[in-house]
Image (cartoon, helix red, strand yellow):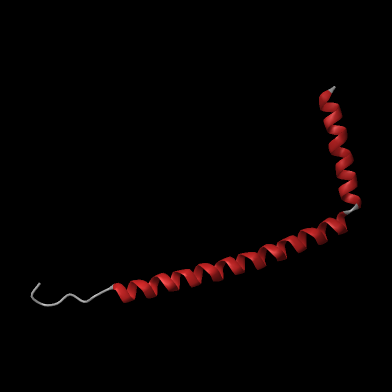
Amino acid sequence: MLPFIVGALVGAATVIAFGKKKELKEGFEQGVCKAKEVAEEVKKGFDGTIECIKSKKALQVKPKEEGE
């Protein structure tokens, strides 16, 4: 009995989703665009952090003196 009820619910959800296909597609596309924007911002943040770390390491490196 339970598999029949679950199957009926999945079928009903599929019919509803198929009817609202255009709205679902638009929502998905907006979500993907937003995710791209967030990923670009995160990448910029990481790039800035990496550059900062590299510049700090370059300042800390001291050449070895001869005779040591």
Left or right: 39, with 28 as reference point:
left
Query: In this picture, is 42 found above or below 67?
Result: above
Report x, y in % for residue 51.
44, 73
**Residue visible at 50% across and 71% down in the picture:** 47
**Residue visible at 17% across and 75% down in the picture:** 64
Left or right: 51, with 63 as reference point:
right
- The quarter of the image holding the C terminus is bottom left
Report x, y in % for residue 3.
81, 27
**Residue visible at 88% across and 50% down in the picture:** 18
Viewer-proximal residue among 28 and 8: 28
Q: Residue furthest left?
A: 67
Viewer-proximal residue among 50 and 26: 50
Report x, y in % for residue 5.
86, 29
Report x, y in % for residue 30.
77, 63
Query: In this picture, is 33 found above or below 7?
Result: below
Left or right: 2, with 67 as reference point:
right
**Residue visible at 84% across and 38% down in the picture:** 10
Query: Residue 43's quadrant in the figure?
Result: bottom right
Query: Residue 61's quadrant in the figure?
Result: bottom left
Query: In this picture, is 8 found above or below 39?
Result: above
- The quarter of the image holding the N terminus is top right
